Image (spheres, coloured by chain):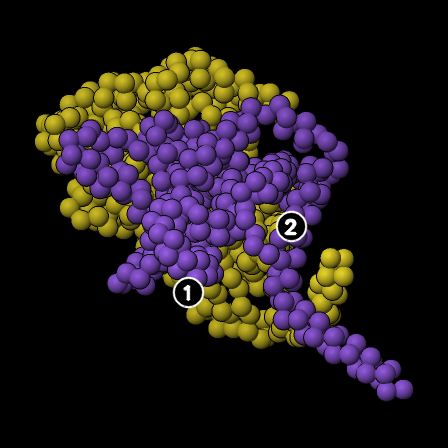
Chain colours: A purple, B yellow
Amino acid sequence: MKMVNQQHFLKNRKFTTWFYGYLFIAPTILAIIVLYLWPMVQSLYYSFNEVKGFQSPVFVGLDNYERLIQDTEVFGALGNTFLYALLTVPLGIFISLITAVLLNTNIKGKGIVRTLYFLPVVSAPAAVALVWKWIYNNQYGLLNQILGFFGIPGQDWLGNPKLALISIAIVGIWSMVGYNMIILIAGLQDIPRSLYESADIDGAGPVRKFFNITLPMVSPTLFFVSVTTVMGSLQVFDHIYMMLTPESPSFKSTESIVYLFFRYTFQNYNKGYGSTIVIFLLLIILALTFVQMKLQKKWVHYND
Amino acid sequence: MYKKITGILLSALMVFALVGCNSGTESKKEDAAKGDKQNVELKMFFWDKNQEPGLKAMADDFMAKNPTYKITVETIPWNEYWTKLQAAATGGDMPDIVVMHPDQVENYAQGGMLMDLTDMLTNSQTANKDKFPQYVVDDFEVDGKYYGVPKDVGTLALVYNKDLFDQAKVPYPNDNWTWDDMMNAAQKITDKSKGIYGIAAQNDGQNFYWNLIWQNGGDMFSKDGKTSTFDSQEAIDAVKYGVSFIEKGYSPTIADFANLSPNKYFSSGKVGMVFDGSWMLTEYLAVKDLNFDVAELPKGKERAAIASGMAFSVSAKTKNKDASLKFVEYLGSKEAQEIGAKLGISIPAYENIADPWVAGFKTIDASPFVKVIEYGHRSPGLNTSNEGSAVVHKYMPEVFSMKRPVDDGLKQIAKEINALNK
């Protein structure tokens, strides 16, 4: 009799704990379903339909996908997007890690420096783009002034098709370092001090300590950062949209896949094809993330 | 793992149930908006900050005459306007009254987003369609029904910097100007050492080369609108003329415009001439020490410039149908459009009342903008709202940066647009 009671009580308690747990995460889960999951399902549905203007979807099967496979513009944009990712991801993560390590030491005013690094993350993209447009300006820009001071001829950062994507990538890196740095600092602070202390006793130098302790121990965080950064860089849109116009000579060499999605969906009123483009990007990101998941066994070090 | 997922879904369902219980209070608001007896709230969207005072003045005048109405005017920048409006319309949250663009009206009307205003425009005493230029009325006609009360006419003219003309000792542009005159003036004004250019030859249809093509007797599309005639000899020669300003160095390159917009070039006194719209005058007048005036665009084989009207449209899903109709009827009346005209916001669409608009400018002669109404061309509907514009954006930057011969570029454009329309 007693036993049964106790079991019942335990079950009940378990249920309440679970219930409250889910209750607390419900708002987030709900937001994810409404703002991410549902639109994703909708995009998938639209991609098999012709959706012109405000009219109801008309089922067209795989027509949109057929068009996509033959669309040179999509592959051009994909090329630009990959190039952007190649320019921003490795360099961006490297800079984030270095700043994180440096700002994890006990230097004076590190709070202020961290804040400064984090500022780009919280600034409005429109304001960021405006300021950078002035920095890059070919005649009065700050960047060319500085280069001129060292006797380097000024460049047309935004007007030259060969440079425009690099210019956008610089802004991209500058925007993401702060966010990644904060996450990496959190990862670094999880590393037990005792490891470093024993390394000191063994006479390891700072470089050795970095490669033998810091890097392996922070690798799970680094893995998270690299996955999210790859996703983010493949979705580059706002800086391009704000800094260049379709009339500009360098636009075609910076147009990204999300820009194409935006153009078809919101400007050309062709939601069906726009959705197809974005599903295509989703598949690419899924594939890349899968590869990263497989590769993590090679370099990510979990100590559990 | 599966337990976790079911747990998540269950908790989500619970919250949904909670939300569901809460949606009963909405219907009370709707009852308040019926009839003229109670207060009616209307919302209007527009994209031009410069015109906000004018629209607000009209709304205020209407509210003074109809105390039960409360009208709010919201300005959304042009770059975001159509994206926002599309989202609002799709979500069933479109404002009662919106300003419509001739290139966009078809999408909204065919999508069932706009109220049919044919009855009002044919029977109204104040906002009758006979009172407006025929082409503006027709621009907002879709499948035989009218969806817009004409608001204003936007036209293009030559805006020029008087100081730069004086420095180069070039006589000001006049009504007899030809293409050659414009080229000569551009040559004389250009001063590389000071970074001053004669003209802003921009890669922009509305603000540059469409006008040249029309002036050369050509067009972008055939009369029935079905075939692209970008590859006609008239169009090719016109664009060649336009690009030659850049080739000869009389205009900043389009890479320069990627850094600084043509408007900014002009307002900072670095460019002698720019093709610009009547809607830009208030902005240029606000620039200190900018000494400028207006002339008609030069004559090619014929006089031509773009003239496109905007209109007020009503949301098909408005909760205040009668009130909205009453308000747009007022907006299309002579008294309302005169209020706007006096504030210099734009050339009113209402017949024979452009004079107060011109008279509103004390330092410049804005009449060339009004003359365009006689010979204006309608927008070819080649804007971002259709895929033809994407084709233009693919080749025109190459043409304007001299990377692709003009005839080759225009032939490609015509070919691809025609392939799209098949």
Residue B54 in the image: x percent, y percent?
37, 57
Residue placed under numbered mark 1 in the picture: B61
**On the rendered image, what quadrant is the N terminus of chain B found in?**
bottom right
Identified by mark 2, the residue type is Pro
Residue B13 vertical position relative to residue A142 in the rendered view, above or below? below
Q: Residue B148, image x and y in percent?
A: 54, 47
The answer for which chain carries disc 2 is A
Q: Is residue B324 visible?
A: yes
Above or below residue A110? Residue B270 is: above
Label 2 crowd (10 A; few <14 / some 14-19 / many >=20): few
> In the image, what residue occupies the spot 44% across and 47% down?
A212
Q: Nearer the viewer, residue A23 or B332?
A: A23
Between B278 and B43, the residue placed more toward the observer is B43
Q: Which residue is mark 2?
A: A39
Q: CA distance from mark 1 to mark 2?
A: 44 Å
Few, some or many C-alpha atoms within 10 Å of disc 1 (few <14, some 14-19, many ≥20)?
A: some
Q: Report which quarter residue A74 is drawn in.
A: top right
